[in-house]
Image: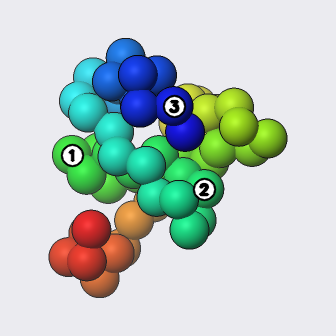
């Protein structure tokens, strides 16, 4: 994920920052408790495509 692109992207729900999880290929919004998939290098920033994060995942990130 291009760091400059990551600086520009925000969570569509909270408008807060996103962090990139390289291992899972996801953009993570801690404030929304959501992880958005990145498919073929393209972030899918749709709430309906996002995965809800559990408490354990939030503690480790």
Image location of residue 6, percent across then percent down: 41, 29
Horizontally, is 31 left or right of 43 in the view? left
Residue shown at 37%/17% (left/top)?
A: 8
Residue at the spot of label 3: 2
Instruction: Identify the image quadrant of the N terminus.
Output: top right
Which element carries disc 3, helix, strand or loop?
loop
Image height of 5 relative to 49, above or below = above
Residue shown at 51%/31% (left/top)?
A: 2
Q: Nearer the viewer, residue 18 or 23?
A: 23
Residue shown at 71%/37% (left/top)?
A: 41
Q: Residues within 10 Å of mark 2 (few under 14, many from 20)?
A: some
Q: Nearer the viewer, residue 41 or 57?
A: 41
Horizontally, is 48 left or right of 55 in the view? right
Which of pointers 3 and 2 lies earlier in the amino acid sequence?
A: 3
Residue at the spot of label 2: 25
Give the alpha-carbon distance from disc 3 to disc 2, as whole Å. Answer: 13 Å
Give the alpha-carbon distance from disc 2 to disc 1, as whole Å. Answer: 19 Å
Q: Nearer the viewer, mark 3 or mark 2?
A: 3
- The numbered mark at residue 31 is 1
């Amino acid at each position: 994920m291009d760091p400059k692109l990551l600086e520009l992207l925000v969570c569509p729900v909270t408008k807060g920052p996103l962090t990139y999880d390289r291992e899972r290929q996801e953009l993570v919004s801690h404030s929304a408790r959501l992880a958005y998939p990145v498919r073929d290098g393209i972030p899918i920033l749709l709430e309906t495509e996002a995965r809800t994060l559990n408490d354990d995942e939030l503690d480790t990130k």
